[in-house]
Image: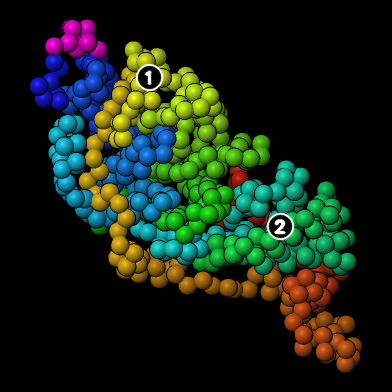
Amino acid sequence: MSAGDAGDKPPEADAEVAAIAAGYAFTGQALDLGALLRDGRCRSDAQVRIPLPMLNRHGLVAGATGTGKTKTLQLIAEQLSAQGVPVFLADVKGDLSGIARPGQAGERVRGRAGEVGQDWTATGFPAEFLALGGLGHGVPVRATITSFGPVLLSKVLGLNQTQEQSLGLIFHYADTKGLELIDLKDLRAVVAFLTSDEGRPELRNIGGLSTATAGVILRSLTAFEAQGMADFFGEPEFDTADLLRTAPDGRGVVSVLELPAVQDKPLLFSTFLMWLLADLFHDLPEIGDADKPKLVFFFDEAHLLFNDASKAFLESITQTVRLIRSKGVGVFFVTQTPKDVPSDVLGQLGNRVQHALRAFTPEDQKALRATVQTFPKSSYDLEELLTGLGTGEAVVTVLSEDGAPTPVAATRLRAPESLMGPVDAAELDAAVRASALYGRYAQAVDRESAYERLQRTPAAEPEAAAEAPSRKAQKARREEPSLVEQVVGSGMFKSLARSVGTQLGREITRSLFGTARRRR
């Protein structure tokens, strides 16, 4: 008997298969996930799919390590690209760079394709490789401190709620004074001033910021920079509009953020992913329901984003996810269990691909039961099914074309058509250098911003012109001063301290996460 045959099953079994198949028989464009698994057989006559217009209703890809989540991301990304939809993938382990190269038709691939009724063809897809701060193989992705904003930066720095609010006041001060915060040294310079003798009176004018808290923030910034984090902030800043491109042949570009070089900085890269998403939300216009998404954004290792998050941070995530779909962006969170995602966010994820779960410990059992409760009612014993799925198999439910949940379907997933593994590092570097984005972002630029302004002595500084420097002062200038000494000793700071409120800049409009765009 072939894998696609129904076998000697009672009529009610065939009726159930037919009912599930009918739930996935969409009339419009759709992505093909795989074939239904029922009673130990793969039913190639019952295909499991996702309607293309429903991809902006968000989703979840979950499962234990080694169950096939990465290949599922690759499979979905390929089909989105083929239908002209740009995709963003975070490649944490370096496994996804192969999406740019045709796959290899081995015995396992041919076997899987035959089981699920897939017409498999080796195909590479248009890809752009990115790297945070240029660490690793990819076009550098940087953000300015100003656009990153106080809420996301507080998350990266590990600040508590009080310190987060205080950092927001510091950003407000810099915004109103027209002090651009491009990189870490800009922000440290502003905080150093506010904790100096000349700057302390300024604290009273921005309300609620104590010298002690400002000092804690300054020390956190100094330690953060000492850990080698400065490369991630600066200019040229990455324009998230570059994630929305299509190739000359009409296929969507798959932007792969290569993260192996920063695997040991999970809090940093997960927060940077949220910055990219928040920036898209900030800039994109409303389009309502569309025939297909403008972008599908896969948020890998999503649990890192929610761990120890403040209430304000979680509320901002929830609001962003709720509203960004009307701008044509679909978000898929990728993690081990639905329990990793807060319920307010989980409730907005209409498309679900749940790979196998382990149940070795009481905590595992609890997570398994919680996962089962998030699925629509079905005839499956989901607790048993989810612990018995093989690699490349998943329990699926998605939103149908009318927005209703489809029947729960155990699914054997299709094989990706691109290379299932990384490409050679030299080949990856060559692709990066050939990228149209490389010339725009490769070279860091350090233009004049808050640090330089605060360090520079104005030409018409009366005190400097009237007072001849002593020998002691001349010796001090020959020695390398600390950053704080450079900042608080500058004439610019003294000028600022004397002219509170007289040199106001235009305050920056900030969005849900306090993110902002000042330059394009």
Which of 275/343 is in front?
A: 343
Q: Quadrant of the N terminus?
A: top left
Location of residue 499 in the rendering, given as x and y in whole percent from the top left corner: 84, 67
Q: Which residue is mark 2?
A: 220
Task: Give left or right: position of 213 versus 133.
Answer: right
Q: Which residue is mark 1?
A: 384
Distance from the alpha carbon under mark 2 to that under mark 1: 48 Å
In the rendered picture of this protein, how many numbered marks are placed on residues?
A: 2
- Which amino acid lies under the numbered mark 1 shown in the image of this protein? Glu
Residue 165 visible? The answer is no
Which of 402/164 is in front?
A: 164
Location of residue 76 in the rendering, given as x and y in whole percent from the top left corner: 31, 40
Number of other residues with Cα within 10 Å of mark 2, as a class: few under 14, some 14 to 19, many 20 or more: some
Q: Secondary structure at mark 2?
A: helix
Find residue 317 and name its label. none
Residue at figure coordinates x 60%, y 43% from the top left: 512
Start-end of magenta stretch: 8-16
Viewer-nearest of discs 2 and 1: 1
Q: Secondary structure at mark 1?
A: helix
Q: Any magenta on residue 11?
A: yes
Location of residue 503 in the rendering, given as x and y in whole percent from the top left corner: 77, 66
Q: Earlier in the sequence, mark 2 or mark 1?
A: 2
Label 1 near label 2: C-beta < 8 Å? no
Which quarter of the picture shows residue 117?
top left
Residue at figure coordinates x 80%, y 58% from the top left: 215
Task: Give left or right: position of 489 versus 302.
Answer: right
